[in-house]
Amino acid sequence: MKIKETVKGDAAVLAVSGNMMGGPETQELHDKVKALAEKKIVKIVVDLSEVKWMNSSGIGTLMACYSTLGTHDGKIRLAGVSEKIESLLVVTKLMKLFETAPTAEKALESF
């Protein structure tokens, strides 16, 4: 899994590629969100358009990011969610928590 960070004003896009299957790579996403929140960048888009698969550890990481931003009065958006990942979020009832957009640009506009 790889993460590309792009800061745009008071918001950031974290473009994730590969699989979100737990381990140190998945933890890196949460670490990036925490570091951005400490810099007062609390509008974060997680672009999942290049994520092939996600397991419960990946979902746990998204929840940790959501929680971290909540404690900093921030917001998280998911962009480019595939049908596979969307179905996972629907089954776990997490689609109610996460606002989604087809692209990172559209997600940024929603803040």
Image (cartoon, helix red, strand yellow):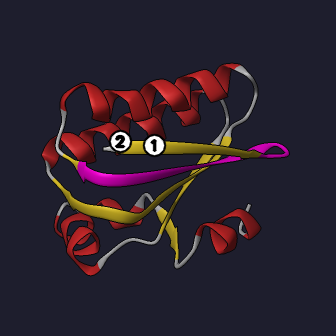
Q: Quadrant of the C terminus?
A: bottom right
Circle 1 — which element? strand
Left or right of 28: which side holds 35? right
> Residue at coordinates 85% horizontally, 45% vertically from top-left?
9
Give how far across and how far down residue 77 sits, in percent. Answer: 55, 58
Dividing the picture into quarters, in which one does residue 71 lie? top right
Please report the residue visible at 19 percent of the width from the left and 28 percent of the height from the top: 23
Q: Amino acid at mark 2?
A: Met
Nearer to the camera, 87 or 46: 46
In magenta segment, residue 11: yes
Residue 13 spot, x, y in % from top left: 62, 51
93 w.r.t. 46: above or below = below
Q: Which amino acid lies under the numbered mark 1 shown in the image of this protein?
A: Ile
| Mark whose residue sits in front, 2 or 1 | 1
52 to 67, vertically: above or below: below
Residue picked out by circle 1: 3
Q: Is residue 76 left or right of residue 38?
A: left
Neighbours of disc 1 within 10 Å: few (<14), some (14-19), many (20+): some
Q: Secondary structure at mark 2?
A: helix
Q: Main secondary structure of the magenta part?
A: strand
Q: Where does label 2 land, which residue?
A: 63
- Judged left or right of residue 52, residue 37 is right
Q: Residue 21 — which label?
A: none
| Separation of marks 2 and 1 at Cα, in angstroms | 17 Å
Image position of 53 with respect to 29: above or below:
below
Residue 78 in the image, given as x and y percentages of width and height: 48, 61
Residue under the image location 25 percent in, 68 percent down: 85
Location of residue 43 in the rendering, given as x and y in whole percent from the top left corner:
68, 46
Pick the quarter of the image with the N terminus: top left
